[in-house]
Structures are given as C-alpha cells and as structure tokens.
Image: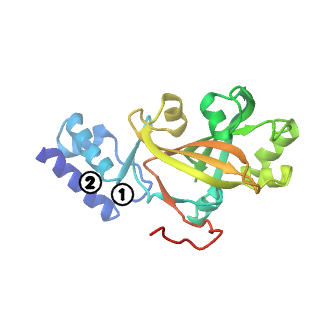
Amino acid sequence: MSIYADIADKLRQDIRQGIYKEGDKLPTEQQLAEVFGVNRHTLRQAIALLRTDGLVRVEQGRGTFVASAPIRYAIGQRVRYNEALKSHGLIAESKFLRAVQIPSPDAVAIALEIQPGDPVAIVDRLAFANHEPISISSGYFPLARFPDFLSDINQSRLQRLGSVSQFLQQTFNCDHIRRQTKVSARTVKTQDARLLALPLNQPILLAESINVDQNNIVIEYGVTRFRGDCMELVFDNDIPSAAPWRPTE
C-alpha cells in the first residue's frame, strides 16, 4: 500500500504546486509507471486515490486530467441552468439529441398528473461547459397542454433559444417554476457514459424535478443526469412563503 500511496502523495504535491494545473492532462499510465519504476497496476491504484480525493478525473479513451473546482448549480424556484454556468465564467452550450412524441409511461404520468398513455413530448439535451459534456436532461411535456410543442417552427425556436424556460414563456405565455426536486446517486448507464465521456463505473447525480406554470399546474417532469465528478448541486431556498411560518408547538 505504501508504494502507491507514496506515488499519489508525489502527484498530489505536483498538482498543488502547479506543476500540473487545472485541466492539464497527466502523462500516460505507462509514462508515469516508468517514472516511478512500478507496474501499471500499482500506478492505477495511485490514480484511484487521487480520484477519490477529487483531484483528477479519468476520461475513457482520453486519459487522466487534473480536475477543476466543481460547478455549483443552485436548485431553487427558478430553473437557471445557463445562468449558473455563466456565473462561473463558463461557456454554456447544449446539443439537442431528440424531440419526439411518446405515450406517457406510468411513472411519467404520475409526475405530470395525467393518465398513463397520454401523449407527451420528450426532449433530450446534452449540456456542455467550456465545450466539455456535463449533463444529459430529459424533459417530458404533456401535449394536451402544449399541442404544437413538436411543430417544426417551435422546435427551431427551442433550439435557437437554448432555454426551455424562455421557450415556454415566449411561445405559450407559460411560466416555468420548480415545484419539487429529488436528487439521488447511481452508476452511469452505458449510453449516458458514452455521451458524458465517463467510465461505466463512474457515479452520477440524478435529479428528478416537477415544474409548474403560474397557475401551479404541472407542465414538465424532468430527469437530469449530472457528472458527479464536476457538478455540485446546492439547494437554494429562494421560494417566498405566502404567509409567515409558525411552529405547531
């Protein structure tokens, strides 16, 4: 254990001294193994310690990189995804993966407060920060509420705006307010791992949200898969109370 722990300590010191800076790619496993005079298995154990500390990230097929500080994304009443990235000085981009109509699965119907099998639009998007993939989101919208959601004109507008909130406001005069969010951790699935450039054993943060309009009617059920190695979800209690809260006892 002391051999790979010593290697991890040396690399940790190099990172803290700025020899390897945020975003820098470390030498290959073979190169580092030769530098330290160990086999690649021992070197991987050292890298695993650095990953546990959050100092490096391993991108499948690309190598090992010095990790940047996590992106803090505040989860509050408003959906401010792009604004959160821009506040970090990051370039926010997104890529539309699909926008199709499907019959509502049972779990989606419960979240949207509709009947199972009712038509919904599902919109999948891949989000980037400084051109690096950080999350995949799937939004389910009831087509009874938004019958023209999937028209060519509306889809072009949604892609141009790059913001679901702005699209709903400008197209349907509909507000976009977060009612509830549930966050859990799980291992990344194969398709998501490929899109997020993650190894299959990498944990992700899964955020499920229910969003409502200005009349408190459910308009979206969202499922977002965040990279756990570079995202930090912070719950922002910015929802104003209708009346002062008073304890029951």
Above or below — where is 21 with respect to 199? below
Of marks 2 and 1, which one's residue comes earlier in the chain?
A: 2
- Where, by quadrant of the figure, is residue 39 drawn? top left
The quarter of the picture where residue 104 lies is top right
Q: Residue 55, how many percent across, how many down?
A: 34, 54
Q: Which residue is at the front of the view, 63 or 168? A: 168
Q: Residue at x 59, y 59 (%)?
A: 85
Identity of the residue drawn at 55% across and 36% down: 195
Disc sitting over residue 11 in the figure: 2
* Residue drawn at 63 percent across, 36 percent down: 110
Horizontally, is 107 left or right of 157 in the view?
left
Residue type, label 2? Leu
Say what secondary structure mark 2 lies in: helix
Q: Which residue bears the numbered disc 1?
A: 20
Label 2, label 1: how far apart the Cα atoms are: 9 Å
- Asked whether the beta carbons under mark 2 and mark 1 sit within 8 Å of each other, the answer is yes
x and y, in percent, of residue 117 in the image? 71, 25
Q: Position of residue 66 (x, y in %)?
A: 39, 53
Q: Is residue 167 visible?
A: yes
Which residue is outermost to the front? 249
Name the side, left or right, on which 225 lies relative to 22. right
**Residue type indicated by callout 1:** Tyr
In terms of depth relative to the viewer, which is nearer, 167 or 108?
108
- Helix, strand or loop at mark 1: loop
Residue 44 percent coordinates (x, y) = 26, 39
